[in-house]
Amino acid sequence: MNSIIHDYLQLSIVYYPCPIIPGVKRKNNLSLRGQVVDCADPRGMRYGHTMKTKAILITIILACAIYPSGMRGGIAADVSDKRAQIIKTAEKYLGARYNYGGMTTNGFDCSGFVQFVFRENGITLPRSTVNQYECGKKIDMGDAKPGDLVFFNIYGTRISHVGIFAGKSAFIHAPTWGKRVSYADMNLDYWKRTFVGAVTYLDDD
């Protein structure tokens, strides 16, 4: 947590790309729950209102307080089985359509899909990609196992995409508008170029 605070104290203003969605009014890029929502919408991008460091810190600190890393230790005696079950659950929804802001089988966005799959397996995650990354335990990609999360910076401004690592170079994700939940290969140049890091919510110790 101290490292998170230190990193954000280096910033005075952070810009979040916010999608233009006809008929949908947004205020300060905040969801109704007070969390920063995903803004990975290729139909049209604009920069939303600036958000001061203090507000961002409060959002992340509160999210990590609600979803502490310590809760990982009690999820299952056999973490290996839990990892396999997460992948099995994710595969069950292959082909589900992408829906910006979606968190149900009617349609998912990337972090909504991850949150849904983990909730189906008894693990509560934050809603946004940013908070899912900040509240997880950072790991080297070489140490990642099925069920861990991989994150990407698609637009060059912040973490904006997440998927569930499935082993080797594969991950499962809800890609973007017009596409469906599917496997992707991290060895492709696009994913290599945009990769940010990996985290785990599963304690193997």
Image (cartoon, rainbow, N blue to C red):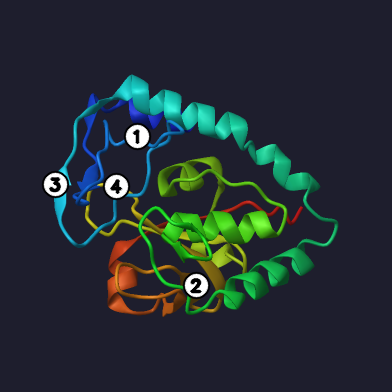
For the point 68% across and 51% down, the residue is: 123
How many labels were placed on the picture? 4
For the point 54% across and 79% down, the residue is: 168
Report x, y in % for residue 62: 52, 27
Residue at mark 4: 158
CB atoms of marks 1 and 2 within 8 Å:
no
Work out whether mark 3 precedes mark 4 in sequence or the reverse, and give the earlier one: 3
Secondary element type, mark 1: loop
Circle 1: is it few (<14), some (14-19), or many (20+) Cα within 10 Å? some
Q: Looking at this view, is 181 or 3 the one in front?
A: 181
For the point 50% across and 72% down, the residue is: 172
Q: CA distance from mark 3 to mark 2?
A: 28 Å
Classify residue 83 as left or right of residue 94: right
Q: CA distance from mark 1 to mark 3?
A: 15 Å
Residue at mark 1: 30
Work out whether mark 1 precedes mark 3 in sequence or the reverse, and give the earlier one: 1
CB atoms of marks 3 and 2 within 8 Å:
no
User: Furthest residue to the top?
Assistant: 54
Work out whether mark 1 precedes mark 4 in sequence or the reverse, and give the earlier one: 1
User: What amino acid is at disc 2?
Assistant: Ile
Q: Nearer the viewer, mark 3 or mark 4?
A: 3
Residue at mark 2: 172
On screen, residue 71 above or below 154 = above
User: What amino acid is at disc 1?
Assistant: Leu
User: What amino acid is at disc 4?
Assistant: Arg
Q: CA distance from mark 1 to mark 2?
A: 27 Å
